[in-house]
Image: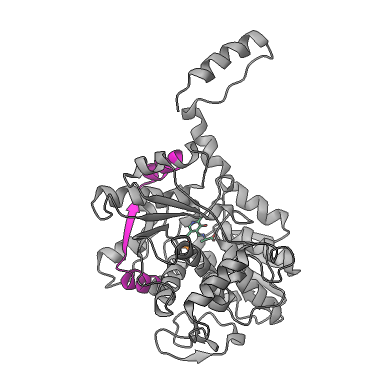
Amino acid sequence: MGSRLQCPRCSSTFPLESFRSTCTCGSLLDVRHDPPPVPAQKLAEIFGARLRPPSAANDPFPGVWRFRELILPEAPDPALSLREGNTPLFRHPAISHFAGVEELWLKHEGMNPTGSFKDRGMTVAVGVARRLGYRALLCASTGNTAASLAAYGALGGLPVLVLAPQGKVALGKMIQTLAFGAFIVEITGDFDEALRLAMRLADDHRIALLNSVNPFRIEGQKTAAFEIAEGFGWDVPDWVVLPAGNLGNISAYGKAFEELQSWGFTKRMPRLAAIQAEGANPFYRSFQLGFAQRVEVKAETIATAIRIGSPASFERAVRAVRSSEGVVEQVTDVEILEAKGAIDACGLGCEPASAAALAGVRKLRSRGIIGPKQRVVAVLTGNLLKDPDAVLRRAQDLDNRTTLPASEVDLRKLVERVLQRER
Ligand code: F0G
């Protein structure tokens, strides 16, 4: 089975080993695979069997690599893996009630090793960069890419340089990045500026750029969509809803569902919904214009992960929305926090950007775009502990933190209050 890098705009091709992100014409490149030589049904069985022990213990291809035939048939052996992926789908009556959609599942990507979906892409892209002999790894990041790259760089023994917007990286992500030993530069500009700088620095051929402009990142991130289809018995839900910032992830889901259909795994595509924060909504605005033009904004939102005004994967994401008959919606910071409150209150928890997905489902339902009987998967992209400040800011409203003397009498009174609290 052959694979290559291909330009969706001018059709130029490059070998995988070129590890390029952009074509000479300026467009981002995609990895293109020939159809797998094994029939879809047989491969689906193989993917399922790889999930089960005893192969798990000494598997050279753990985590997302059980789908290797569809992401990178010539996988680095052994894979550079933290056993990412294979994240759960949850249903909870309170969440369904909140959104007004009975058949609503949450795909919790915050349960990946570094607490976000980025690990799926990093295991592939960092593994390839290492095999190709790159000496250092580079990214711009609002935080999660940084934490994930820092972890996979550490695992693979490669130094990591991160460019981040000053004061806008949530604490948990900063802590992970530092702990894993990456160099982090907080620049005075925003994420968009940091990414422009990183793309320029990447002309140094000793250092590999690991943002989602990198086509190998997209290949790894496709596996979340594969798991959703597999979870639905190799069918798809009516909708898959995800938060959108730099637009790499929605592009990965679009590519994955297109490939599953064209290779015979599924009969149709789900409709994709990209949800943006109102203060960081360039893709939403462009969608309102029928994608007739690309829009840039100066981004501001409490959901710092998606505080992005000039998304790099714009063209890929337009394809994903169009080919899936998808939509782009926006939600306010208040709506994001309400949704986060609902997710936190049922014990799952997520970071603010992830809650945008649920806020988006609720809005699309209230606007009648999602039907009450439709099957919906909302993707929670990051773990609650990523952004502790977002919780501390809310703790006062929650009224569940107090200081008391260590007196049994006082504590017994509190026990009465706790027993009365209704869920
Ligand atoms: N959700 C979370 C938690 C994220 O960290 C990101 C992106 C997104 C959603 C949006 O995904 O960019 O592919 O559209 N975080 C990047 C980072 C920008 O640097 O960690 P996207």
Please tell me whether residue 341 belongs to the stretch shown in magenta: yes
Asked whether residue 215 is in view, the answer is: no
Q: Residue at x 73, y 59 (%)?
A: 181
Where residue 190 appears, as percent x and y from the top left, is 50, 59
Quadrant occupied by the N terminus? bottom right
- Residue closest to the eye, 198 or 401: 401
Asked whether residue 105 is in view, the answer is: yes
Relative to 184, is 270 on the left or the right? left
Can you tell which quarter of the image residue 54 is in? bottom right
Relative to 231, is 180 on the left or the right? right
Please tell me whether residue 288 belongs to the stretch shown in magenta: no
**In the rendered view, how is the structure colored?**
one colour
Relative to 35, is 181 on the left or the right? right
- Residue closest to the eye, 221 or 63: 63
Prevailing SS of the magenta stretch:
helix
Where residue 300 appears, as percent x and y from the top left, is 42, 52
Residue closest to the far top: 409
Magenta range is 317-342
Q: Residue at x 62, y 48 (%)?
A: 172
Can you tell which quarter of the image residue 260 is in? bottom left
